Image: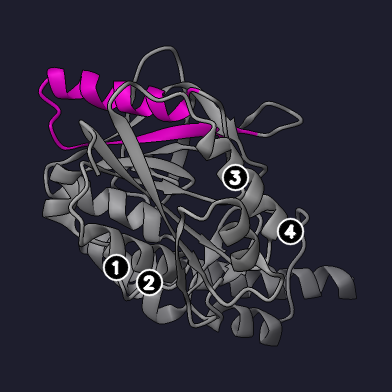
Amino acid sequence: MNADTNIAVLLTCFNRKDKTLACLEQLFQQELPFGTAFVVYLVDDGSTDGTSEAIRQTYPQVKIFSGTGSLFWNGGMRLAFAEAMKSDYDYYLWLNDDTMIYPGALQTLLETSQQLQQQGQNRAIVAGSTQDPDTQKLTYGGMAQISRWYPPFKAREVEPTDAPKACDMMCGNFVLIPRSVVEQIGNLDPALTHYAGDWDYGLRAKQEGCTVWIAPGYQGTCPRNPQPEPGSAPKLEDGLKKIASPKGLALQDTTLQSFTEWKIIAKRHGGALWPVFWLLPYRKLLWSILFDRRLKKA
């Protein structure tokens, strides 16, 4: 590829053809600086709705890789990442296929990255913030940890302003990672299946002296994933089954992973209190189930 700045765009998808095509349409309509080019690496993790065929017809330049059907987000993105890293790009862009980026979004991330480099931030990850298409409220972007005394991923969302803002970690919806970071941090962790691989990557990068930022303003739309109703509690057996599943158990204010994966996260990012942080979410789950049952009996 003959360009001054080469970007590998990484996506993974499963059975949402219309969203994936809409996402690619927004991507290929991006207003890019002169001398900038990108190549799309997309993992189709066993879709049965004709996603790959539709992409080949509409965007034949996209490099499509077939998943096993059990890769989920972290596994699919890791496969795309690994394929792209073979060609040593200047930047690697994570993009969720349910994220519809605005026309100048990629250029904004590139300009933010270059601005940070001029300020001495040579290993800076830059995330774009997304908003709900209806309410315009912040949905995904950067996160700042509340305190080292809180469990890993107990963080507040960072609202975008008209200037770059430092964060501790980022959601993987729309993230630009320079070669300098990838050379040091490498790929997503293969020990994680779906949840928290993006947050873990940002925290690992910070531990190695890299920085995490959000670009100015909003860069696209993406609705929040559905959340359980306040006060709802699953049955114990259902809760345990969902915790063991790749996507974990979605609660009102968090998502519980499998015991093994959450142990990796807690031990890696929880400091001396990691055993407490590891067990605390499951205690809360059991308490919520028992409390809900008591209320129903009352």
Crowding near the residue tagged with mark 2, few <14, some 14–19, many ≥20 C-alpha atoms within 10 Å: many
Q: Which residue is mark 3?
A: 23
Q: Are marks 1 and 3 in contact (CB under 8 Å)?
A: no
Please report the bounds of the magenta region as a residue range: 104-131
Amino acid under disc 4 = Pro
Q: Which residue is mark 1?
A: 189
Residue 115's spot in the image, x, y percent? 23, 18
Amino acid under disc 3 = Cys
Mark 4 or mark 2: name the one nearer the start of the chain. 2
Q: Are marks 4 and 2 in contact (CB under 8 Å)?
A: no
Amino acid under disc 1 = Asp
Q: Which residue is mark 2?
A: 192
The answer for how far apart the CA atoms under marks 1 and 2 are is: 6 Å
Mark 3 or mark 4: name the one nearer the start of the chain. 3
- Image point 29% across, 48% down: which residue? 202
The answer for how far apart the CA atoms under marks 4 and 2 are is: 23 Å
The answer for how far apart the CA atoms under marks 2 and 3 are is: 25 Å
Q: Are marks 1 and 2 in contact (CB under 8 Å)?
A: yes
Query: Marks 3 and 4: which is nearer the front?
Result: 3
- Image point 42% across, 37% down: which residue? 142
In which quadrant of the rendered view does residue 262 lie? bottom left
Of helix, strand and loop, which one carries label 2? loop
Horizontal arrangement in the rendering, residue 242 relative to residue 280 (left or right): right
> What mark, if any, has residue 228 been given in the picture?
4
Q: Quadrant of the N terminus?
A: top left
Residue 77's spot in the image, x, y percent? 41, 62
